[in-house]
Amino acid sequence: HFEVVRMVRALGQKLEDRQLVLLSRRMDSMLRSEVPSLLQLQTGTSADIFAKIKTMITDMITTMQQNLQEEASKKAYCDAEMGKAADKKAEKESDLETVSTRIDAAVSKSASLKKQVVTIKSELSDLAETQVNMTKLRAEEKDLFAKKEPETQKGMEGVKSALRTLRDFYKNSGVQVTSGERKGAAGGVIGRLEDVEADMAMSLSQMRSAEKSAETNFDRDLQDMKLEKAQKEKDVSYKTSEAQRLDSELNSLNSDQESLETEMGALLDFVKSLEAECLVTPESFAEKQAKKQQEIAGLKEALTALDATAEMPALVQRHARALRGGSMAGKLAP
């Protein structure tokens, strides 16, 4: 029977299981304190010791088998929850990355639009200043034309009047002067006056043509500037509205990001607690299961050995009864 104790002790030491070592010590203590005497062997009371030890081993086997089942169930739970948590974590990370990308894009686009609005407003200001300057210059040119045209017209009329007077004078004096002739004193004077008249006529024509061209160009430029101003104001309105929409979207995205970060924090806390519960030992689940199976197999082997040992007192008891029976027969014989 002490062989069973040694088997349990050796198994506990091999597998480094303190419970098995303690069990072997209890078994050893029980056997040493109640070593079967010849009287116990004869009466069969030693069987109680083996029955107690057998119960202890059987109970431990049952407990270990229950632990195996519980650990297997916990392993399944841990695997399932860790898998779900990993999927949720990956999903939240993807959502956070998407929101972050959208935030960066919205911030960049909004800033770009606002910068464009500032540039366009500056261009509108320059355009307005240019229009004011152009209008002022056109007004000055128009005023100058309004002053120069009648002066030139009046001067030309004066030259024409002088020519008529001279021609009448020379005609009345009997001097023949033909237009365009430059002979004699009369011809020279009239010729010079005719040149002055022609120059003034050309100057007046050029002045009127320049005024007409300036007015046409001014009207065309003014119309182009109005169209440009309308387009730029439209751009300012659209870009301002789009920047405001992006800023509003940013508020929503920032709120989404905060919510996702809160959810991620809660998820990480859950994963941390789950890891603390499921990853408490570096020993793998398969190694623990194999070790438990070895312990159970070893205890079953010890139980078998104990059953074999328990048969010996029964044999001794039958032998003792046989001896008592023979002794009584000798006493009764004549």
Image: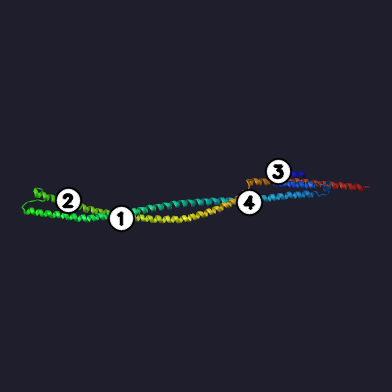
Give the label, 2 or 4, closer to the camera.
2
How far from the left and from the top, in percent, is residue 67? 67, 50
Q: How many neighbours does mark 2 have within 10 angstroms: few (below 14), some (14-19), or many (20 or more)?
A: few
| Residue 13, numbered label | 3
- Left or right of residue 326: residue 122: left
Q: How many neighbours does mark 1 have within 10 angstroms: few (below 14), some (14-19), or many (20 or more)?
A: few
Give the label, 1 or 4, closer to the camera.
1
Q: Residue furthest left?
A: 174
Measured in 3D between alpha carbons, the distance from the residue under mark 2 to the one under mark 4, in whole angstroms, is 116 Å
Disc 4 marks a residue whose amino acid type is: Lys
Measured in 3D between alpha carbons, the distance from the residue under mark 3 to the one under mark 1, in whole angstroms, is 104 Å
Q: Earlier in the sequence, mark 1 or mark 2?
A: 1
Q: Earlier in the sequence, mark 3 or mark 1?
A: 3
How far from the left and from the top, in percent, is residue 69? 66, 51
Q: Which residue is mark 4?
A: 74
Q: Which residue is found at the position 21% from the left and 53% from the top?
A: 207
Q: Earlier in the sequence, mark 1 or mark 4?
A: 4
- The residue tagged with tag 1: helix, strand or loop? helix
Q: Which residue is mark 2?
A: 199
Q: Which residue is mark 1?
A: 132
How far from the left and from the top, in percent, is residue 217? 27, 53
- The residue tagged with tag 3: helix, strand or loop? helix
Residue in front for this viewpoint, 164 or 105: 164
Residue in front for this viewpoint, 249 or 164: 164
Give the label, 3 or 1, closer to the camera.
1
Measured in 3D between alpha carbons, the distance from the residue under mark 1 to the one under mark 4, in whole angstroms, is 85 Å
Q: How many neighbours does mark 4 have within 10 angstroms: few (below 14), some (14-19), or many (20 or more)?
A: some
Q: Which residue is found at the position 14% from the left and 55% from the top?
A: 158
Measured in 3D between alpha carbons, the distance from the residue under mark 3 to the one under mark 2, in whole angstroms, is 133 Å
Disc 3 marks a residue whose amino acid type is: Gln
Give the label, 1 or 2, closer to the camera.
1
Measured in 3D between alpha carbons, the distance from the residue under mark 4 to the one under mark 3, in whole angstroms, is 27 Å
